[in-house]
Image (cartoon, rainbow, N blue to C red):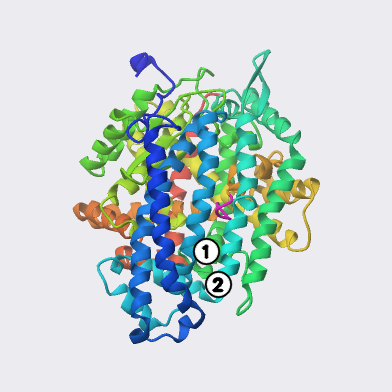
Amino acid sequence: MGDGNNHIQGVPWDLSGEYESADCSAINKDLVLASELMDQMAEQNSVLLPLLEQADELVVEAAGDGIAAAREIHRIAEEIRLLLDNPETYADCCMSVDSQDEAAQILSGRLQSYQKRFTELSQPLAQFLDLASLEVIEAYLDHELTSATRFVVEHARKRRDFSLSLAEETLISGLAQDGIHAWGRLYDQLAGSLTCDVLIGNESESMGLAQASGLLQKTDDRTRESAWRSINTSWEEHIESCAAAINAIAGWRLELGRRRSNKSSMHFLDSAVHMNRISRSTLNTVLEVAEESIPLARRAALLQAKAYGKDQYGPWDQRSPAPTVSGEDRPIPYTEALELIANAYRSVDPTMGEFVEMMAERQWIEGTVGPRKRPGAYCTGFSKSRTPRVYMTYTGGASDVITLAHELGHAFHSWTMRDLPDSQRSYGMSLAETASTFGETIVRDALLERAGTPTEELAIAWEETGALISFILNIPTRFEFEKNFYEARQQRPVRPDELKALMSRAWEKWYGESLSEPDPLFWANKLHFYISGLSFYNFPYLFGYLFSLGVYAKRLTFGDEFFPRYEGLLRDTGRLTAEDLAAKHLDADLSRPDFWRDSVAMLKPRVDQFDKLVSELPV
């Protein structure tokens, strides 16, 4: 751990258990085997393809060979997915730490052709499962090879009206790599290569965006504002490129939606809610409750501004720490942060604390500071070993501790499901935020209990209040912008100045009088708008935050039964919709506002206590 307890930044992660390098022989071996399996998949497709034209008319008796071929395709595809996902995850991990890692870039490029072929070979089975009669589907699922896929198959069939012909689906997937996904990759490369000049004290320092973002966690208000303005200045120079990318990504999706609207009209939100395994009515309910909660969240934002001696909350205050009495930063060493998180997790169940310790001991967490690191934090995992990895830039801020707790929550969720069939280990993003936000909450509460002084108590309450502001105001701001942008993009590409105006209006709607100024370039500097594989990567955070608070409240209700129930809930996230999951494990109806309002009600006493702590700060 470097300098021991005095070492502030995190340590590098260990990827050697998967591969030695991005150009090692083990990766080549995996890709050779993947090619051979794809040849076998193509042979089985020759049996399935002739059946697709009359798939909806097939009866079980006439579809025996097709059903057998479909099962075999599924088996082969599961194996191929492991062989391709593993090196892809490895390449992504390498490029996150060093955006200019040439070997990883070459590997990522090599994998595109494999992924393209695999996607094309997967289309016949997808078509068969979407279009075949219910009787044939039941016969397909009635087998040890496929029985575990029931939920995935049935959920996918809900969108069968939006399916195109096999030739069209194959063409779309083939063009996507150098189409929509190319724009996403371009943005990633841009984000990893940009630098900015930040005024720290009286000196200007040049640094990468990830390092500059770390300064947004400093207690010095001037440093945070300087970092925020410098980051935006850097993005401003590439505003046309960002506008081209975001318009191309949205335009691709909208055009694809129009093409799919043959039997019924496809809304640009349909894919996002389906992927999240929630209904539009549930989403609308969550957003309505968030809007009801605006006064509470604005009050929290104004209290944070007051603590800094300001009248309004600045956009550079999103990750600000609690102001210290001395006015100096008090960084939390990396090893101390891990110990804090492990103890907090252990308060729920010993196995959760042991999990955090295991992640640290095996060095499955990346926390270093580097000039070519990509900004942000995430949890990923290797398919073959079923082991998670956590990525972030740890600089010692209190919000870094919470971010680490958040990502370790994701990792624990994955670890809990590691023995399940692959088809049951993938879950919607709205449920993906359950364990992560739950992890944040238990860390805050555990830290609050052990706070020895009002200053320490304020620091912890500050993080909690910051989460409320982020989830109730910032996340809906992102959703508001993206929804309004898609509506405008339906007519024509949206110019950079128009994108700025849309972004500013979204900030003003949700933050209102609590905000000193909007962040018009947030659409350019937020990675989430450029993830080519999914849209509306925002509302799942709001859903997960409020849902996890509802789960957290059940600790008292369920007592000793809570952890087994919690584990059961996490394990079911890959085989139930969010609504069915809540009904089964929480006795809750997510389409009604009661559950969500109860979650928000938990927050008011916490804001009241925060108000008291801020009022007691020395003037």
Q: Which amino acid does label 2 sit on?
A: Ser
How crowded pointer 1 is (Cα within 10 Å; few <14, some 14-19, many 20+) is rated as: many
- Name which residue lies at 54% across and 47% down: 112
Relative image position of residue 38 (x, y in whole percent): 42, 56
Q: Mark 1 — residue?
A: 273
**Is there a contact, CB below 8 Å, between mark 2 and mark 1?**
no
- Name which residue lies at 64% across and 41% down: 186
Secondary structure of the residue carrying numbered label 1:
helix
Q: Which mark is residue 47?
A: none
The quarter of the displayed image where residue 367 is located: top left
Q: Is residue 152 left or right of residue 345?
A: right
Q: Is residue 573 left or right of residue 249?
A: left
Q: Which of 557 and 306 is in front in this view?
A: 557
Quadrant housing the C terminus: top right
Q: Which of 406 and 16 is in front in this view?
A: 16
Q: What residue type is labelled 1?
A: Val
The quarter of the displayed image where residue 255 is located: bottom right
Taking 347 as reference, is 157 above or below it?
below
Q: Mark 2 — residue?
A: 163
Highlighted range, magenta: 532-537
Secondary structure of the residue carrying numbered label 2:
loop
The quarter of the displayed image where residue 176 is located: bottom right
Taking 384 as reference, is 129 above or below it?
below
Relative image position of residue 307 (x, y in whole percent): 56, 31
Quadrant housing the N terminus: top left
Relative image position of residue 379 (x, y in whole percent): 42, 41
